Image (cartoon, rainbow, N blue to C red):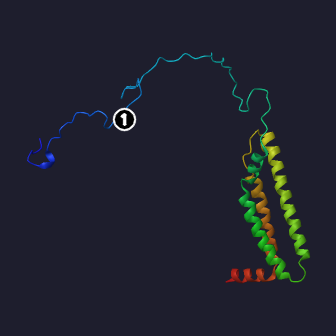
């Protein structure tokens, strides 16, 4: 036991509770620390009978797959878009180097850029169509993104940018100078 000579070791004196101090007056029927527990209630209705479902993965058997909203399809097209965006930026910079180094009027090179981008969009659409026919219809898979189509378009755009750089005389001479040293 603690040494009683120390002032902190004195025993506390219990004080009896005083009426009206500390605990506010309570409602009738309420007792502090006691929670009334009632009888469990019986359900008012009977549950519906459970109908079994065959696991087909698409819903009820024989029912077509539910239509998805347009937002879902657009989100699916955006997945993998960073490939096409980066390659498109690379192709645009290469086109700019090629167009500006040629000098003269820019209407011809601008027409080449527009037609090249239209071909890239057509390649993307063709890749999506082939993926739909092969993956979804023939193999029965669900496509969750457009990464393959974006990758095919990116390869085309990078090749296009490299082709534009190969037509620029000072870029070719700089490349030959670097590769020979």
Q: How many residues crowd around disc 1 within 10 Å: few (fewer than 14), some, or many (20 or more)? A: few
Which x, y percent locates residue 141?
74, 41
Picture quadrant of residue 2: top left
Disc 1 element: loop
The answer to which quarter of the image holds residue 29 is top left
Residue at the (21%, 36%) spot, across then down: 15
Front residue (pair 18, 4): 18
Which residue is disc 1 drawn over? 24
- Residue 62, percent from left and from top: 79, 27
- Side of 128 relative to 7 (left or right): right
Q: State which quarter of the image contains the C terminus.
A: bottom right
Residue 24 percent coordinates (x, y): 37, 35
| For residue 175, above or below residue 16 | below
- Image spot of residue 117 (x, y percent): 84, 64
Quadrant of the snapshot with the N terminus: top left
Q: Residue at x 82, y 80 (%)?
A: 100
Residue extending farthest front: 20
């Amino acid at each position: 036991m603690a040494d009683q000579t120390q002032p902190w070791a004195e025993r506390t004196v219990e004080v009896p509770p005083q009426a009206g101090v500390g605990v506010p007056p309570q409602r009738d029927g309420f007792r502090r620390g006691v929670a009334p527990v009632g009888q469990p209630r019986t359900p008012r209705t009977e549950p519906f009978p459970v109908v079994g479902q065959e696991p087909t993965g698409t819903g009820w058997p024989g029912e077509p797959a539910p239509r998805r909203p347009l937002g879902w399809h657009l989100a699916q097209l955006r997945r993998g878009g960073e490939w096409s965006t980066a390659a498109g930026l690379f192709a645009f910079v290469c086109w700019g180097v090629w167009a500006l180094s040629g000098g003269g009027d820019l209407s011809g090179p601008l027409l080449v850029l527009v037609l090249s981008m239209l071909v890239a969009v057509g390649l993307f659409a063709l890749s999506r169509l082939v993926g739909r026919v092969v993956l979804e219809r023939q193999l029965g898979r669900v496509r969750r993104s457009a990464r393959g189509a974006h990758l095919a378009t990116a390869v085309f755009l990078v090749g296009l940018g490299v082709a534009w750089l190969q037509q620029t005389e000072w870029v070719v001479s700089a490349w030959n100078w670097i590769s020979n040293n």
